[in-house]
Amino acid sequence: MADKSGKSGGLPFANPARTSSTGDPNFDLALSRIGFNGARASNAPPVSLAQMAAKPAGQGAPASSVAARDLARRDWLLETQEKQRRLSPLAGGLLRTTGMQAQQFLDHFYAPGRPCVIAEAIGHWPALERWTPAYLRETVGDAPVEYQGNRQTAGDFELAKDRHKLSLPFTAYLDLIEQNPGNDAYVTAYNSAANAAAFAPLMADVGDIPCCLTPGGGMLWVGPGGTFTPLHFDLTNNLLVQVTGRKHIVLVPPAQTHLMANRRHVFSDVHDLQDEACLTRHPQARQVQPFEVTLGPGEMLYIPIGWWHQVRALDFSVMLTYTNFLWANDGYQGFPGD
């Protein structure tokens, strides 16, 4: 689906219902996955999945059948809700906004978990004009930087990040990506801790984003046109801030997770929704209804936790990503394993 625009409006919210527990954490998880959080309808004692599985034939379904049914119901509910949202460009579109205030962002995007493009929020940053390859070369110089290398021939470069860690003087890294554009060499957020000292001189060129974030640094991405981050979701809410160049992002709502071939952690075996070979291997992904947006310099994209996305650089690109929002961003704590 193409990038949509519109104005957001306030909506009343009901008070959340109190949660209840069955006494069995696995069954509670299954109930939460299908959206059940109301008070118990009866005073009957809780029944665990183990008890249900132990019942004789004809006296209740085994636990595996219950879990499969509940997962199917959850997928049905999420997909139905997503179809309903898409009836409205305002409720179901990828909105573009300017002049965002913190309370507006919280009410209309952060709390509901809706992505949006925010323009004109960092126009005062010197980085927007300064961060050319020549300026980066002069400012960072030969300081050693860590990057992800030898990615082009490795299908699992995102899963095996540590194996791809390499280091070069920054000037040599810029020479490398100028001579060899594409996805083979990329300074990513995963390298941020190692690169903090090298990139510290650049941080004087960036400012705060008070509509969304607490004061604090972002994670820097530097790479040539052609770098690619494959289809995945994150365990935090993320704000992508494009400073130099353009990136094309494909977003897929969490309701379509059942189409993503999600076998390993947060990654999709589909890999690339715009690659015909990937779609041939995973034909169910042809049913995906994505949102697409190209971010240019000075634009930001809010990606809520759980939203699938893939990112491709169209030019030499410098981006910052942030997770230090004004509100809680700790959903990763309850993630159920790899």
Image (tube, helix red, strand yellow):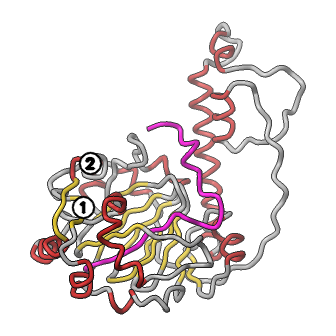
Residue at 43% across, 48% down: 266
Task: Please say if 158 is above or below 65.
Answer: below
Indicate the amino acid at tag 1. Answer: Glu
The segment highlighted magenta reads 316-338
Residue 89 x %, y %: 61, 76
54 or 319: which is nearer to us?
Answer: 319
Quadrant that contains the C terminus: top left
Q: Tag on residue 146?
A: 1
Picture quadrant where residue 146 is located: bottom left
Q: Tag on residue 162?
A: 2
| Crowd band around label 1 with a 10 angstrom C-alpha radius: few (<14), some (14–19), many (20+) | many
72 or 111: which is nearer to us?
Answer: 111
Residue at 67% across, 16% down: 52
Residue at 77% across, 32% down: 21
Residue 215 x %, y %: 56, 73
First-in-chain label (1 vs 2): 1
